[in-house]
Image: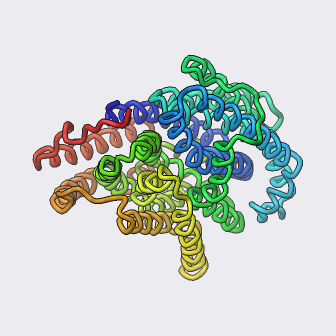
Amino acid sequence: MNLLKALATVSSLTLVSRILAFARDILMARIFGAGMANDAYIIATRLPNLLRRMLAEGAFSQAFVPIFGEYNKRRGHDETKLLVDHVTTMLALALFAVTLIGIIAAPLLIYITAPGFIKDAGKFDLTVQMLRITSPYIFFISLVALAAGILNTYNKFWVPAFAPILLNICLIGGALWLAPRFDQPIVGMAWAWFVAGFVQLAFQVPFLKKIGMLPDIRFNLKDEGMWRVIRQMGPALFGVSVAQISLIINTIFASFLVAGSVSWLYYADRLMEFPSGLLGAALGTILLPSLSKHHADNSTEEYSKLLDWGLRLVFMLTLPAALALGMIAVPLLATFFQHGAFVAGDVLKTSYALVGYSVGLIGLIAVKVLAPGFYARQDIRTPVKIGIATLLATQLMNLLFVFGMQLHHAGLALAIGLGACFNSTVLFYFLRKHGIYQPEPGWGKFFLKLCVALLALGLTLWFGMGSEQHWLTTHGWTRIIHLAWLVAAGVAVYFAVLFALGFRLKDFAKRGAS
């Protein structure tokens, strides 16, 4: 399996999903702006999404995939299928309970996670109503993540990567068709999330059946593999989800700031998810199964080389993205979101958060390579300890930036970014200390060439972007065309300089474990 080809496939489908997500957010910004209703919607959908990331894409995938890969490599199809049956049954029961709690305890959950909403009864009640509608999404999407782990281990990377496209199609349909049919249009968007969860799960069922891994309902408390997964989940839940826990705490902080703060952070986060999804999530998706297979084969040298390959891609592709997001934050936000109720002031406020987030982009994406370096080896304790330290450091920075330096919502974004850099740095240190990762030769020259290309990119963007006022006052195709050629010029200059300095695509080709 050519991992570069797999990365390109996953990234391409993620790009389509992100484009649709931007279309969705543009519709949301145009229809709902950054006011009370949209704040309520963001909180109501953020909670299920956070639980989905923590339970499914975070703790569950990191705990399940390495053990599933080991079974698939060493124990044969029948034992592997039994593991899938027992884990799926146990997971479905747990998810049903979590969903029920989300519906029943919705007022308490909003009270805890967005206490600032209590002073506005209408806002609080609307958020509770939508959380009850979106809670079943946790059930559907967690099973989607389980299916994705199975399919990725079988190198069927495109199927899970296509599922988010269905999510965004459902949400766009919700904005255009469902929302106008409700007395409170924003409630239609909550129902769109419910539909999207079911559609994504149904899409993956035929592919699971084709590889003989469609789960049957079987309950066996004596399954040793299932208990191994469960034992891994507790620590993994915390260790992988530090950024998500920080995001929950940030939501609490933001709920006390001026109206619109939650929305400004949300739209900045949406732009950050573009590069982090294209590269970070895609790398994590293909690396974890391959690393798990190398570990099962005791291929320590190939294990280290695979980590090195991932880190080089992270630096080569993330640093220019971070630089661009910081430099052209206003052009990006004005072009995508300055429509209807989302005005120039919202663009500027959101740009402050985006600059803060961009500082930590390299850390956010590097974690997607470094954390699997531990979890593929079924080492949970080390990332958990690092996660605790990261969480404490992030909250100390929140207090400093928000209350000490009065950076307000931008301080929350900066703390998340710097916290991710701290997390990735310490993960890297322990991978080296434990002898898991040995850097390949040539990193010094590699960084020097990157610096030259980044300088060229920065100059291109600086001279090409013009003034912020230009972006805030022009409209329509003028902004779109200017942004398109600015981004195209930056990309062309960056990669042209890298090519001139000797970078070639074939140098990054990498074959994964079979």
Does 506 appear above or below 262? Answer: above
> Residue 423's spot in the image, x, y percent?
47, 66
Q: Residue 381 is drawn in which quadrant?
A: bottom right
Q: Is residue 384 left or right of residue 190?
A: left
> Residue 43's spot in the image, x, y percent?
71, 52
x 42%, y 56%: residue? 370
Q: How is the image coloured?
A: rainbow
Report the front residue among 12 and 510: 510
x 61%, y 51%: residue? 59
Residue 474 shows up from this direction: no
The furthest residue to the right: 104
Q: Quadrant of the N terminus?
A: top left
Residue 71 shows up from this direction: yes
> Residue 124's spot in the image, x, y percent?
83, 55
> Residue 420's spot in the image, x, y percent?
48, 63
Report the front residue among 57 and 210: 210
Does 440 appear above or below 116? Answer: above
